[in-house]
């Protein structure tokens, strides 16, 4: 067994779970009239109600003891100090610097001059584009930007642009392409005028196969549609840590925005990766998003653990995953504008903490990241809520609710009803109608869907993931698991084009290659 599962705090929690396994959440409310107030925490524009989790004051005390044992406070301090907490790559994790307003940060290795320079360049570009001064090869002003990226270069900006679409400039469209399938780009280009369309190629290495293939197709589309001799390169921007490759592609150096190795892709939307967001809602709106995240950073850095919103949020997940055997986590925003949030959180949580060895390279004997999934309510009530209420899986749910105005009252009623039904269930003599209840959920209430509130929400989830990783003793900032598939795809591509498959190719893959090649010939 691992050091963690043999540790005093872990064993105390396991014993506590055994003692309280039969506890019903409804009974906890009956025993404590103040439970709703005691089991809630707020910061800024966010309010977390976790009273519908099967936790008691003793549960929380033991979870906080686990956090103390893992030295969570020290790890928080180490991250904000710029120490190389990404140990497998010997790098710091400085996404918090991207939204900092300090003149010097962190204490060692100040990166703020670079960050401020990029923000200034972003502002200049956004102001040019939104004022009609940014023009293409034929002199027509930009009317649409198409972001070419994948993973963290796509999910974050796509989600935020959707969430804040009510604040977008209707005269400047922003579209997204991520899939290698050519139909994704074709759909994004439908109805666009090449003379007024610009592309943002976002790739940290500028070698990402999907993004570069889409960039080549985009350039071919421009070259075919623009007048003869027009410079297609004038319609491109890039965001990359490999500027020379972007320039070699034909993108002007002054239109290449830098990335840095101390920012992971899934944490990069606060950088120039967020250029599509700034173009859509304006640079002031983008900086308000940064401000919201910065406020959550300050809270996370300074608040005591027992009143620290990301820490409490993480500990609730630890309790469900490691002591209540929850293998999945549903995220259900009762706001259509947040419908892309579950996909964004899938990458954030599963790429960060989907690990099977700890920081010392030892295989773990406890669960790490749950499978994250979800969709917007109320639509999801008519698809998978049946499983939540009567299925055999234990699935904690994060309900996200925007207070907004009176038009959202019906949404609020549905979200609260779902949380209540999961907790209380329904007792009946007809087994097929019975709902067992006692199923956990959290409600995160946003005062409004503003850039500030959204920044706070996203930083909350980022820091939650980091705290989980600290407790699990895993590195939340690398992603070696994605590399093998990429390398295998590069090796197999020549075979699909007619060459002999690599010698180590298995029989099933060889047979499928042959079948695909035959279909290509028909």
Image: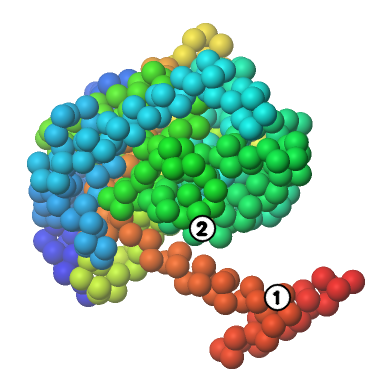
**Color scheme of the displayed model:** rainbow
- In this view of the protein, which residue sits in the foreground, 49 or 71? 71
- In this view of the protein, which residue sits in the foreground, 267 or 496? 496
Quadrant hosting residue 80? top left
Does 29 appear above or below 71? above
Quadrant hosting residue 145? top right
Residue denoted by label 2: 208
* Badge 1 density bin: few <14, some 14–19, many ≥20, Cα 10 Å: some
Residue denoted by label 1: 496
Q: Answer yes or no: is residue 157 visible.
A: yes
Q: Residue at x 21, y 61 (%)?
A: 90
Does 249 appear above or below 156? below
- In this view of the protein, which residue sits in the foreground, 215 or 500? 215
Residue that lies at the very extreme toward the bottom in this rendered image: 503
Q: Residue at x 16, y 37 (%)?
A: 105
User: Marks 2 and 1, Cα distance to the nearest angstrom?
Assistant: 19 Å
Of the 4 image quadrants, the one containing the N terminus is bottom left
Question: Which element carries disc 1, helix, strand or loop?
Answer: helix
**Residue 481: where, in percent of width, then height?**
42, 66
**Residue 335: where, in percent of width, then height?**
53, 26
Left or right of residue 241, residue 488 in this image: right
Q: Residue at x 53, y 15 (%)?
A: 131
**Residue 149: where, in percent of width, then height?**
53, 47
**Residue 130: where, in percent of width, then height?**
53, 19
Residue that lies at the very extreme toward the top in this rendered image: 406
Left or right of residue 255, residue 216 in this image: right
């Amino acid at each position: 067994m691992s050091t963690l599962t043999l540790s005093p705090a872990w064993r105390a929690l396991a014993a506590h779970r055994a003692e309280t396994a039969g506890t019903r959440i409804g009974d906890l409310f009956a025993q404590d009239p103040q439970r709703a107030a005691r089991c809630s925490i707020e910061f800024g524009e966010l309010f977390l109600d976790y009273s519908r989790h099967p936790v008691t004051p003793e549960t929380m005390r033991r979870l906080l003891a686990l956090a103390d044992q893992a030295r969570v406070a020290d790890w928080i301090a180490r991250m904000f100090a710029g120490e190389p907490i990404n140990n497998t790559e010997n790098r710091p994790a400085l996404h918090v610097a991207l939204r900092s307003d300090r003149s010097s940060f962190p204490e060692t290795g100040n990166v703020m001059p670079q960050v401020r320079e990029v923000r200034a360049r972003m502002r200049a570009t956004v102001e040019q584009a939104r004022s009609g001064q940014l023009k293409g090869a034929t002199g027509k002003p930009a009317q649409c930007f198409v972001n070419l990226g994948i993973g963290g270069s796509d999910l974050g900006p796509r989600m935020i642009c959707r969430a804040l679409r009510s604040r977008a400039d209707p005269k400047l469209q922003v579209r997204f392409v991520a899939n290698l399938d050519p139909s994704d780009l074709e759909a994004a280009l439908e109805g666009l005028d090449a003379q007024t369309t610009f592309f943002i190629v976002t790739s940290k290495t500028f070698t990402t196969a999907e993004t570069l293939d889409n960039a080549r197709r985009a350039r071919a589309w421009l070259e075919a549609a623009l007048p003869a001799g027009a410079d297609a390169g004038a319609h491109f921007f890039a965001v990359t840590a490999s500027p020379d490759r972007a320039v070699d592609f034909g993108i002007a150096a002054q239109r290449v925005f830098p990335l840095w190795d101390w920012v992971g892709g899934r944490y990069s939307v606060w950088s120039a990766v967020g250029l599509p967001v700034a173009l859509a809602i304006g640079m002031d709106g983008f900086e308000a998003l940064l401000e919201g995240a910065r406020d959550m950073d300050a809270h996370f850095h300074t608040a005591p653990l027992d009143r620290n919103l990301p820490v409490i949020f993480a500990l609730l997940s630890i309790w469900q995953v490691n002591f209540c055997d929850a293998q999945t986590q549903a995220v259900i925003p009762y706001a259509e504008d947040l419908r892309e949030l579950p996909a964004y959180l899938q990458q954030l949580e599963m790429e960060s903490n989907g690990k099977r060895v700890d920081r010392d390279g030892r295989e773990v004997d406890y669960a790490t990241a749950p499978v994250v999934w979800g969709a917007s309510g109320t639509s999801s009530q008519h698809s998978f809520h049946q499983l939540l209420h009567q299925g055999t899986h234990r699935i904690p749910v994060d309900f996200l609710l925007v207070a907004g105005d009176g038009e959202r009252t019906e949404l609020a009623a549905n979200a609260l009803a779902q949380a209540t039904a999961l907790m209380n269930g329904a007792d009946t003599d007809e087994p097929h109608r019975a709902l067992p209840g006692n199923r956990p959920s959290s409600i995160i209430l946003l005062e409004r869907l503003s850039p500030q509130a959204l920044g706070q929400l996203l930083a909350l989830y980022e820091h939650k993931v980091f705290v989980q990783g600290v407790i699990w003793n895993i590195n939340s900032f690398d992603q070696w698991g994605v590399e093998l598939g990429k390398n295998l795809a590069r090796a197999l591509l020549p075979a699909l084009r007619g060459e002999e498959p690599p010698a180590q190719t298995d029989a099933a893959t060889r047979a499928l290659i042959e079948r695909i090649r035959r279909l290509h010939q028909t």
